[in-house]
Image (cartoon, rainbow, N blue to C red):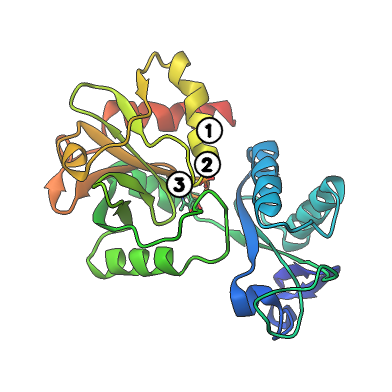
Amino acid sequence: MTRIAYVDGAYLPFDEAGVHIEDRGYQFADGVYEVFALIDGHMLDVDAHLKRLDLSLEKISLVSPVSRPALLVILNETIRANNIKNGLVYMQITRGRAARNHAYPKTLHPVLSVTVRPMNETYRDHVAQSGIKVISLDDQRWKRCDIKSISLLPNVMAKQVAVEAGAQEAWMIDEAGLVTEGSSTTAWIVDAAGKLRTRPLANDILDGITRQMLFKLVDELKLELDETPFTIDEAYASKEAFSTASSLIVMPVVDIDGHKIGDGTPGPVTTKLLQSYKISNS
Ligand code: PLP
């Protein structure tokens, strides 16, 4: 079946889908995006993603070209046209086309595009059984990481360093020596005292939707949550570590910079959170 992409009002065969050479998304990374997990034909945590999208748009003074109901129709129609039941839905809104200048006229027509791709959940679950390796490196990003901007070059570079080092994710460290987040994930540990730790929300990290959803499970699972940032040394000494993202849900981290975490296998809190998240969405 031909893949279909939605671009600015049209559903197009994938290989023919594109934006103009002077789209500001292409030239300036002037745009924002969202990624939804698609399970059994339904996008997960839709309201939370759309709320974060609205906030990202507002923070860069961009107005969606379509209303929220229309956006939902477009997302679902793109899913249907691709006949994909389990996968990832990617959408982005860029400021649109203009002669290349840093400043932009207010009259531009923002461009929405949507793609859907299948995801091998069995493979993801298989990886989660043994966990992933993480490396740490300096956080070289800008000061508005709360915006889900399509400008991801430092994240791309960090992930590439990780992959070339035989790891699957890079956790980034701020100037104070504290872990901010992963290149495409939220970073968590169960510290030596047994507390679940993740960095508090501010401009230096993304408000992860999976993070929001795990917060709701914490009481139910009687876990002690502490939003105090942690150092990489605390991460090395942690009982458990994991990364979260819509594409991964909860991914156990069993090795950070060559330090084995816990006994080197996914720990009980991580496993419980993953199971509970899955159950709450089944
Ligand atoms: N942090 C960064 C930098 C990300 O890119 C992502 C996901 O893309 C996350 C955290 C996790 O966010 P979410 O749980 O909404 O997928």
* Residue, disc 3: 205
* Residue, disc 1: 212
Name which residue type carries label 3: Ile
From the top left corner, tell me how far across and down residue 196 is, in percent: 33, 26
Which of disc 2 and disc 1 is earlier in sequence?
Answer: 2
Name which residue type carries label 2: Asp
Name which residue type carries label 1: Gln
Location of residue 28 by image quarter: bottom right
Label 3 CB-ligand 1 distance < 8 A: yes
Label 2, label 3: how many angstroms apart (C-alpha)?
A: 6 Å
Q: Are marks 1 and 2 in contact (CB under 8 Å)?
A: yes
Residue in the picture at 78% in, 61% down: 81
Question: Callout 3: helix, strand or loop?
Answer: loop
Q: Are marks 2 and 3 in contact (CB under 8 Å)?
A: yes
From the top left corner, tell me how far across and down residue 135 is, in percent: 24, 56
Residue sticking out furthest to the front: 103
Label 2 CB-ligand 1 distance < 8 A: yes
Label 1, label 2: how many angstroms apart (C-alpha)?
A: 8 Å
From the top left corner, tell me how far across and down residue 60 is, in percent: 66, 57
The quadrant in which the N terminus is found is bottom right
Label 1 CB-ligand 1 distance < 8 A: yes
Location of residue 262 by image quarter: top left
Question: Callout 1: helix, strand or loop?
Answer: helix
Q: How many marks?
A: 3
